[in-house]
Amino acid sequence: MTAAKPESLPIVDLTPGPDADQRIAAEIGRAAREVGFFFVTGHGIPATLIEEVFSESARFFALPEAAKLKQSIRHSPHNRGYVAMQGESLDPSQPADLKEAFNIGLDLAADDPRVVAGEPFRGVNLWPEIVGWRDTMLTYFDAVWSVGRRLHRGVAIDLGLAPDHFEDKLDQPMATLRLLHYPPQPSSAAAGQIGAGAHTDYGDVTLLLTDEVGGLEVQTRAGDWITVPPMPGTFVCNIGDCLMRWTNDVYVSTPHRVINRGSDRYSVAFFLDPNPDASIACLPTCVTDERPARYAPTTGAAYLADRLARTYDFLDKAADA
Ligand SMILES: O=C(O)CCC(=O)C(=O)O
Ligand SMILES: [Fe+2]
């Protein structure tokens, strides 16, 4: 595997102030077009909440496997719950990822009409029996969702759309808060087996918090892998395939991977995908004579279902083999 060089990423500072909207939009626009990855500072989420999310996450992953499997994602038709070690492969051409994860979606009640009707991505969350755990995760879910919407305000301004263009497409989103745990890379790992195989994210934006261990690597346009330095408390944000499609490839979704060369590593990802019924058609300001629309219109739900099927398909084939 090629050695990665350390390099920093552009910074988007969400600190409010005079002309902040324009400045933020320009910072996002530049980073999203050129790199597809950037740090987000000034987000306003209290450090105490972030610390609590990490400690509660570690508490869950420290439970015996049998306890964690009570909330297995296999019990959820809606992508919620626990994904066991080596339970998926973000790069389907490589062996399974050396990580375990826990997915939390928009929190709906069992009697919510959308849940009762069996709408795609409209399910109940699965919760471990740890006092206070659900409250911590839902408080953080709301806080990071709000940061994601602020980023979309910048995206809209940068793309010459009304600042609130994305608001009604992100008010019932298919968002996933994903807690991740990567054990140290074992010497027994198969060739090509790493923490998270090279992939692009599926949604609009991902907001990632990492601990001090490091291990996230990003592929530059030139094809080199660079390591992202750990910046606890600062988000690493990247553009996903859905926003790339929406912007007719004006913004770029960039491949990345995780190789844990250190001790146990914990990260917390928030994938912000649009509402299931949001129309994903190339935005008018991103279509010109020189750049005609490259993608047929689809919906948020149809797009995400297709992408998830490809990731988990690997698993089913492996289990059948
Ligand atoms: O854990 C990380 O640093 C990145 C995880 C990631 O890229 C993903 O889950 O999509
Ligand atoms: Fe990712």
Image (cartoon, grey):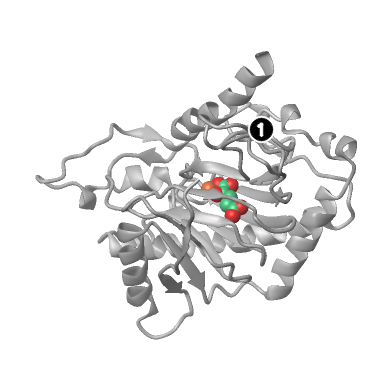
Q: Position of residue 151 (x, y in %)?
A: 44, 63
Q: In the rendered view, tell whether residue 140 sits above or below residue 70.
A: below
Q: In the rendered view, tell whether residue 91 sits above or below residue 258.
A: above
Residue closer to the observer: 8 or 172? 8
Q: Position of residue 313 (x, y in %)?
A: 57, 23
Name the residue: 27% across, 52% down. Answer: 250
Residue closer to the observer: 214 or 154? 214
Q: Position of residue 64 (x, y in %)?
A: 90, 42
Q: Quadrant of the C terminus?
A: top right
Furthest toward the left, the residue is: 289
- Left or right of 250, for residue 9: right
The residue under label 1 is 115
- Left or right of 71, for residue 177: left
Furthest toward the top, the residue is: 321
Q: Position of residue 315 (x, y in %)?
A: 63, 25
Q: Residues within 10 Å of mark 1 (few under 14, many from 20)?
A: some
Q: Secondary structure at mark 1?
A: helix
For residue 56, what is the image quadrant?
A: bottom right
Q: Amino acid at mark 1?
A: Val
Furthest toward the bottom, the residue is: 18
For residue 126, what is the image quadrant?
A: top right
